[in-house]
Image (spheres, grey):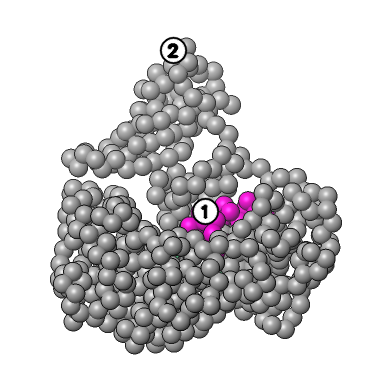
Amino acid sequence: MNMYRLHELALPIETDEAALRNAAAARLRVRPDQIRDLSIARRSLDARKKTVLSYIYTVDVALGKGVRLPKSVLAKTERTPTETYTVPESGREALPHRPVVVGSGPAGLFAAYLLSLSGYYPMILERGDDAVTRTKKVRHFFETGELDTSSNIQFGEGGAGTFSDGKLNTSVKDPGGRGRFVRETFVSFGADPAILYEQKPHIGTDVLTGILLRMREAIEARGGEFRFRSQMTGLSTSGGRLRAVEIGGRERLPTEAVILAPGHSARDTFRMLENMGLKMEAKAFAVGFRIEHPQAMIDLAQYGRADARKLLGPAAYKLTHTAKDGRGVYSFCMCPGGYVVNASSEAGHLCVNGMSYHARDSANANSALLVTVSPSDYRSLTPTGFEDVPESLAGLLFQRSLERAAFESAGGNVVQQLFSDFERRVPSSGPGGYASCLKGRGSFGDARSLLPDFLSDDLAEGIRAFGRKIKGFDRPDAILSGIESRSSSPVRILRDEGMEASIPGLYPAGEGAGYAGGIMSAAMDGLRVAEAVIRRYRQPAAES
Ligand SMILES: Cc1cc2nc3c(=O)[nH]c(=O)nc-3n(C[C@H](O)[C@H](O)[C@H](O)COP(=O)(O)OP(=O)(O)OC[C@H]3O[C@@H](n4cnc5c(N)ncnc54)[C@H](O)[C@@H]3O)c2cc1C
């Protein structure tokens, strides 16, 4: 059956599906009842003219039996491309033991899912707890400040994405259809099908938890195995290749293929790998603060009318600015109707991040407001006493020094400051015209001093510039919370064309390895690495 793809159908946001069908029929010069099937391939919001907010659609259309397009229309109408994701054929090399996946974040989980679909019975090692136990521990941490360093916002089933906004946008090119496969998999495990076509799809932490449980069950049903509270603490090699992983410093698990997807916060794991001589390099990342505003203010600035939220949901933004000193300042991981969270995973260290529930119904919008730092900055920015640290881990140490200062500045509470006080270099004593939506304990004080002065100046310059794009962004009582230090990994583990690290048999994947920057890109990278394992090895025996 022929399907036709139509682009750029613009309709006011209030219109229904019948109007879309009419618009498609008019474009194809057929009657609406001659369209047998219509599905939305993509939908994005056009808010450039605030007086008429429109959705821009890309749709796929199938015509009824015997309906022909006029020749002139046919000549300029595209056929719907096929975007089927294809799993490679299994290789020939023997795999005496089942592959091991370290980490159950999006990269590890999707790698394990693909391996299980292809008959490889993966063993998944996760240092944190299962999602239900982990959720209780995170709640306890928010209430008491008592941190479980193995099970927290960063560590545990689902990885760093579990307590997130669940935004699924990515700028990664996707000719192989991996992104589509990831989103279809999320839908098959309970996500709203709208994530297949929305330009800015989002799941929400509450819905994500259920999806994780169902994905785990599906992997287990195909012979995969999850082990929680099972940290990979070492790797054994002999004959120039990987032979086993060590779990919890005690147990040895033989394997010839390990997908290493530990996320960007596994600092002890990076150290262990560095001690083994694994080839890694420091990479650029960004640091800054979470900034909060009333969501109603952002809605008005973005939509031009207060009632649009009912139809469109709370508004998002994405902002960039080049500071006078040439550094990039930008908003990142924006959470409409979200919460700022204490996202710490190391005792005596503190960092923040943002999350939302599916409904995105808190009173505030928040985003990370970041400025870039490069490997050449790290040495000069990190306090003295770290001179013996290898070059590859210098970024990680810079992060740790910021997070230690953040922890100490407010006795383990998230330190917050109003923008006017941040600019005047005075501590804040409390909120201004609205309260912070914070998960975890917070104290108003001096957030600015957490960063070197020139980086705080860049951020203040950026906030002023963003105030010219979004009215009120630079309001005096905008709330800054610190420190936002884990926007991406400070290291990259080098891998070759076959996706292997400098230790043969080790396959680094996802954000911690330096190949992803969010849920989608991590999941897609997990698939890419699992494909490399499948392409090379034949399936192991079930009981191996
Ligand atoms: C609060 C928050 C909100 C976010 N919101 C979004 C969002 O809305 N959209 C988006 O795209 N991205 C978001 N992100 C980023 C996103 O979550 C990450 O980019 C993504 O999870 C990275 O996936 P990953 O699988 O590479 O690593 P991770 O998700 O970090 O998973 C790594 C896993 O490995 C485990 N692990 C580490 N070391 C070991 C070891 N030695 N042995 C065993 N297990 C180990 C960890 O416990 C962890 O579960 C958010 C992150 C946070 C913290």
> Which residue is depicted at the point 56% across and 25% down?
2
Would you say the magenta stretch is mainly helix, strand or loop?
Answer: helix
Front-most of 68 and 468? 468
Q: Is residue 318 above or below residue 63?
A: below
The residue type indicated by label 2 comes to Ser
> Which residue is depicted at the point 17% across and 59% down?
472
> Which residue is depicted at the point 38% across and 23% down?
27
Question: What SS does tag 1 mark?
Answer: helix
- Would residue 522 be visible to someone looking at this image? no
- Report whether 404 appears left or right of 255: left
Residue 484 sits in quarter:
bottom left
According to the picture, the residue beneath numbered tag 2 turns out to be 72
Q: Residue 310, percent across and down?
A: 26, 53
The residue type indicated by label 1 comes to Ser
Q: Is residue 330 magenta?
A: no
The reply to whether dot 1 and dot 2 touch (C-beta < 8 Å) is: no
Front-most of 430 and 419? 419
Where does the magenta region start and end? 511-530
Q: Is residue 141 above or below residue 424?
A: below
